[in-house]
Every structure is written in C-alpha cells, then in structure tokens.
C-alpha cells in the first residue's frame, strides 16, 4: 500500500496540480477521488511502491503529492499518472490536464478559466488586474503550496507577466 493521507505528506513532497475544466457534480467528484486514491494506492516506480496522496480543492483542483524520500517518480510512473488522468478525462468528458489555461476568480468569486490571450485581453479591459486572485498550478512542491496556497493575487504570481 502506497497511499498516505495528503495532509501527512512531508513539505518536501513533489506535487502535481490539475484543474477540472468544469466543476464536477458530487457523484463525479466522489468517483474522481476514489479512482485517484485507488491509483496512488497501486502506484509504483521500478516495482517500488510510491508514497503518495491526493486531495481536491475548491471543487476544481486535483493535487497529487509524492513523498520521494524513499522512492522517486520515474518517467514511466509519471506516464502512468497522466494515462490514468486521460482515462478519467474520457470517462467524464472534461479536461484535467490542460496546463495552458489561466485559472482565476472573477469579480463575484467564481472560479473561471481562460486562455493566456484572453487573460491578457481581460487585463487590458480592466476586468482582471494585479489584485485578481489567480491559481498557480505550476507549483511543483508541497511546502510552498502549504505556506502560500495555490491562490494568490496576480501581482505576486507569474501571472503578473500577462497583466
């Protein structure tokens, strides 16, 4: 068994962040989490169990954490993760692995997703700005996400380049 509670993973754990293209319903969310928990329970690299956990944030973001202190991820194990996510995308009919999107909160607090080009246009029109909350899904370590979160003002994230 390699699954560990996400909250028990050490701060130096590796992290992958994925976003659901649309907000899944309660049954879809339960199935998504069950499927991913089953996956990490069997996840291996070079026949060695990986100590990993998953969590779901804001009804949109799937985080997969991996404690690499004993066994690190391999190319094949990362391919297996992406393959499982691809299967779930086909099953649910929405994307989880589209890293090209910008995720932010609109003026009434709803989570939105747009292309980089559209985010730039929103910035030019004044719809989004330096204080707009954005989600930084490029985070690759659990510690920084625990200390700062995924959500922060655009001015304090790489998103500032698009404003």
Image (spheres, rainbow, N blue to C red):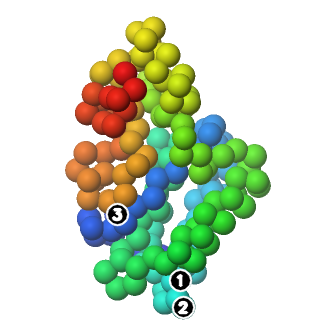
Q: Residues within 10 Å of mark 2 (few under 14, many from 20)?
A: few
Cα–Cα gap, marks 1 and 2: 6 Å
Q: Residue 44, labelled with which disc?
A: 1
**Image quarter for residue 69?**
bottom left
Disc 2 is placed on an element classified as loop
**Image quarter for residue 72?**
bottom left
- Tag 2 or tag 3, which sits nearer the N-term? 3
**Image quarter for residue 125?**
top left
Closer-to-camera residue (60/12): 12
Q: Is 82 located above or below residue 162 in the figure?
A: below
Is the C-beta separation of discs 3 and 2 under 8 Å?
no
Q: Residue at x 49, y 90 (%)?
A: 48
Q: Residues within 10 Å of mark 3 (few under 14, many from 20)?
A: few
* Residue farthest along the left direction in this orientation: 147
Asked whether residue 93 appears in the rendered view, the answer is yes
Q: Residue 47, labelled with which disc?
A: 2
Is the C-beta separation of discs 3 and 1 under 8 Å?
no
Image check: 68 left or right of 29?
Answer: left
Q: Residues within 10 Å of mark 1 (few under 14, many from 20)?
A: many
Residue beneath disc 3: 7
Residue 87 appears at what percent x and percent y?
72, 61
Is the C-beta separation of discs 1 and 2 under 8 Å?
yes
Closer-to-camera residue (124/28): 124
- Tag 1 or tag 3, which sits nearer the N-term? 3
């Amino acid at each position: 068994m390699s699954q560990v509670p996400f909250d028990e993973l050490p701060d130096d754990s590796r992290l992958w962040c994925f976003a659901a293209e649309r907000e899944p319903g309660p049954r879809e969310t339960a199935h998504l989490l069950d499927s991913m928990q089953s996956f990490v329970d069997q996840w291996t690299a070079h026949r060695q169990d990986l100590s990993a956990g998953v969590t779901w944030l804001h009804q949109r973001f799937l985080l997969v954490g991996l404690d690499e202190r004993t066994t690190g991820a391999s190319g094949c194990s990362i391919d297996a993760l992406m393959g499982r996510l691809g299967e779930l995308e086909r099953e649910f009919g929405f994307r989880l692995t589209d890293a090209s999107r910008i995720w932010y909160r609109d003026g009434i607090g709803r989570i939105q997703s747009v292309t980089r080009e559209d985010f730039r246009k929103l910035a030019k029109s004044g719809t989004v700005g330096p204080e707009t909350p954005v989600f930084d899904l490029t985070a690759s370590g659990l510690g920084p996400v625990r200390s700062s979160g995924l959500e922060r003002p655009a001015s304090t994230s790489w998103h500032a380049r698009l404003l």
